[in-house]
Amino acid sequence: MDKTDSAAQSYYYEIRVQGHLDGSWSDWFNGLDVTPQDNGETLIAGHVRDQAALQGILTKIFNLRLLLISLRRIDLGS
């Protein structure tokens, strides 16, 4: 895979944080789905265009003082 292919690659991320946020936070997290879970966590999930966008989302989580439980990248292919 060359740089052109890599730049066009889209990844789906699942980010879990401690605490409940409702779906109204979706805009804050660049349109990602925000879903509270029964176990007291929130799942923030969706397509992230690149590493800079991911860093921005993680910075928002940090600024909200949310505890990051997990971060998982899922390659859905092209």
Image (tube, rainbow, N blue to C red):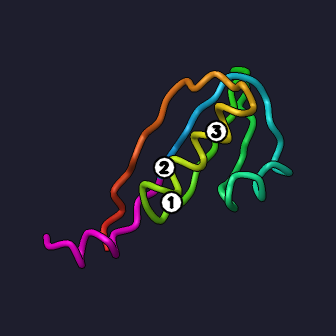
- Image point (60%, 47%), residue name: 57
The tag on residue 48 is: 1
Residue picked out by circle 2: 13
Q: Is residue 58 or residue 25 the one in the foreground?
A: 58
Tell me the element at label 2: strand
Quadrant of the frame with the N terminus = bottom left
Question: In this view, which residue lies farthest toward the left?
Answer: 1
Tell me the element at label 1: strand
Q: Could you tell me how far apart the alpha carbons at marks 1 and 3 are, in whole angstroms? A: 15 Å
Residues marked 1 and 2 touching at CB (< 8 Å): yes
Which of the two labelled residues, at mark 1 and mark 3, occupies the earlier sequence position? 3
Which of the two labelled residues, at mark 3 and mark 2, occupies the earlier sequence position? 2
Badge 3 crowding class, 10 Å Cα cut-off, few under 14, some 14 to 19, many 20 or more, is many
Amino acid type, residue under disc 2 in the picture: Tyr
| 1 vs 3, front mark | 1
Residue picked out by circle 3: 43
Task: Please state if 72 lies on the left or on the right of 4 as rendered.
Answer: right
Provide the residue span drawn in magenta.
1-12
Amino acid type, residue under disc 3 in the picture: Leu
- Image point (63%, 21%), residue name: 67
